[in-house]
Amino acid sequence: SILELTDSAYYPSFRSIFRNVVAAVKEAKEISKYLKPLEKCLTKLEAVELTEAHSLLMSLLHMVCLVWSSCKYYCSSAKVINLLLLISNQIIDMANKYLDPTSLFQGEVQETIVKVQEVIKLIERFKEMFEESRARVVTLFPEDVEPVPWLFHSKIVFKRLNAYLNRLKVLNEFFEIAMEYSKLEKVEVGGLNGRHLSSKVAAVFDEFNLAFNVFRSVAYDPVEPEDPSFLQDYKVFKEKVLDYDRRM
């Protein structure tokens, strides 16, 4: 180059900048090579129903493993944790779209509880897939490269997802109680005291419906872990249910 031939004082700096640019371009190309398939799979995940997401999640985790084992620039806990957090957040977005939290208490209890349980099942299966991927990732490295395991704790990856899952489990318990009490509508007690006992059961059923219907008009998001409103209302609801149980 001219700078080299003229023994310019700027030549060492220019050479250093040039090498850094070449290295950065090489790094960007390699990262793009492995992240583009991952991006396509994430786009597919956005388009499918939650009930069809299992196989795509398995594919996504396998791609994350390949990125870790094949791309030296991404064999970093911080970078892979960010990828896994991205997938976890997408699962939450998909679950919210499927459950429609704003109308969660408006529909039929039987249909709603099935949906809640499907989401719980998917999240728990995803967490199992993660542990399976953790065990498998060291087997994917090239023969001439020393395998690097995932040593980061799953709690870092699943902090938000676990909080969301725990909230869904409380909601599932809530709807299970509603399912049990819905059976009282058809209860008829026979015998000498049947009429009296039937009226007591009917009264408890009416009171339960009043307590349950409070949730139909709430303005908060019941699946948002950072909002304690549902938990506060559920605590009051459970105290009433315990009283109904004692009376029966």
Image: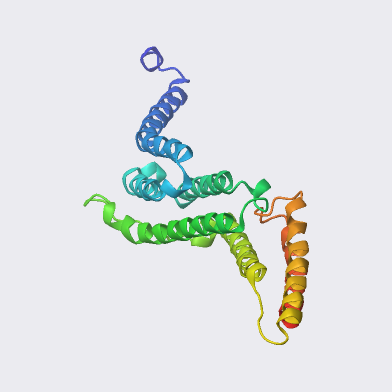
Residue at horizontal 52%, vertical 59%?
117
Residue 35 spot, x, y in % from top left: 40, 37
Residue at horizontal 31%, vertical 45%?
70
Q: Is residue 41 above or below residue 134?
A: above
> Which one is nearer the viewer's eye here, 103 or 111?
111
Quarter of the image for the N terminus: give it: top left
Residue 196 spot, x, y in % from top left: 76, 81
> Which one is nearer the viewer's eye here, 215 or 244?
244
Q: Quadrant of residue 189?
A: bottom right
Could one spot residue 228 in this view of the protein? no
> Which one is nearer the viewer's eye here, 192 or 40?
192
Locate residue 154 relative to residue 6 in the image: left or right: right
Quarter of the image for the C terminus: give it: bottom right
> Which one is nearer the viewer's eye here, 47 or 68?
47
Residue 56 spot, x, y in % from top left: 38, 45
Could one spot residue 164 in this view of the protein? yes
Q: Is residue 167 above or below residue 90?
A: below
Q: Quadrant of residue 131?
A: bottom left
Furthest residue to the bottom? 192
Q: Is residue 106 above or below residue 242?
A: above
Residue at horizontal 39%, vertical 31%?
23
Locate residue 78 relative to residue 188 in the image: left or right: left
Residue 150 spot, x, y in % from top left: 41, 58
